Amino acid sequence: MDRPVTGADGADGADGAERSGRSGEGGAASLTLRSGAPGLALAVIAPLAAIALVGFRVATEGLAAGPEDPVPPVVLAVATVVAGLVLGWRAATQRADLDPSGIRCRNLVVGFEVDWDLVDSVVVHRRGPVQLVELHLSHLRRHHRLGAATRFAGGDAEALAGRLAAHPRVAERLVVDEPDRPTP
């Protein structure tokens, strides 16, 4: 059964991280990351932006179809609002599960599953007001970003970085990138 992580100060895991009480390989507990403040902000902004776009079209040109419209504007308006709602839902429900066998992640647009054997490093980037976490994979030029681990700089970001460092599989691969230094 999953329970929220509590920090040394008694915080209830408000940074979106949970630790499972179950143990797997080597007694390591699983770490579950849920969408942080940037993802939740996007969850609100995406549908509002879609509605604003449709509202602007209604205010300027209306939704009446003209002879030059290949697709009726009403269909485009509905598709825009649905796309905004889907993006908002995906942003709010981002998730990353780090367990002893591997990483399962559901980002904004894609999901992936990676075994720890393929992970060369886990890099924490701090860029401006945002902290990002990327997986660098062995023998590939590809990097996977953990969208659920994206945080605004500050207390939540530091708490999440500490929880990542405490995970045994992450700790041996963790690289903290300095803000002014490019990653190799």
Image (tube, rainbow, N blue to C red):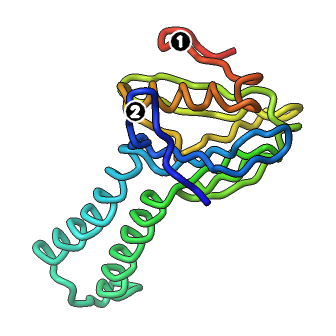
Q: Residue furthest left?
A: 59
Q: Quadrant of residue 95?
A: bottom right
Question: Measured from the top left, where is residue 35 in percent x and y?
Answer: 46, 50
Q: Residue at x 65, y 50 (%)?
A: 21
The kind of residue on which mark 1 rests is Glu
Q: Residues within 10 Å of mark 2 (few under 14, many from 20)?
A: many
Q: Secondary structure at mark 2?
A: helix
The kind of residue on which mark 2 rests is Asp
Q: Residue at x 58, y 56 (%)?
A: 2
Q: Mark 2 = which residue?
A: 156
Classify 45 as above or below 177. below
Question: Measured from the top left, where is residue 110 in percent x and y?
Answer: 63, 58
Classify 76 as above or below 42. below
Question: Measured from the top left, where is residue 72 in percent x and y?
Answer: 34, 88
Question: With 175 as the anchor, is 5 left or right in this view?
Answer: left
Q: Quadrant of the C terminus?
A: top right
Q: Relative to the observer, which residue lies in front, 83 or 41?
A: 41
Q: Quadrant of the N terminus?
A: bottom right
Q: Secondary structure at mark 1?
A: loop
Question: With 29 as the anchor, is 24 left or right in this view?
Answer: right
Tag 2 near tag 1, CB within 8 Å: no
Q: Residues within 10 Å of mark 1 (few under 14, many from 20)?
A: few
Q: Which mark is residue 178?
A: 1
Question: Measured from the top left, where is residue 57 in percent x and y?
Answer: 20, 73
**Label 2 vs label 1: CA separation?**
18 Å
Q: How many marks?
A: 2
Q: Which mark is residue 155?
A: none
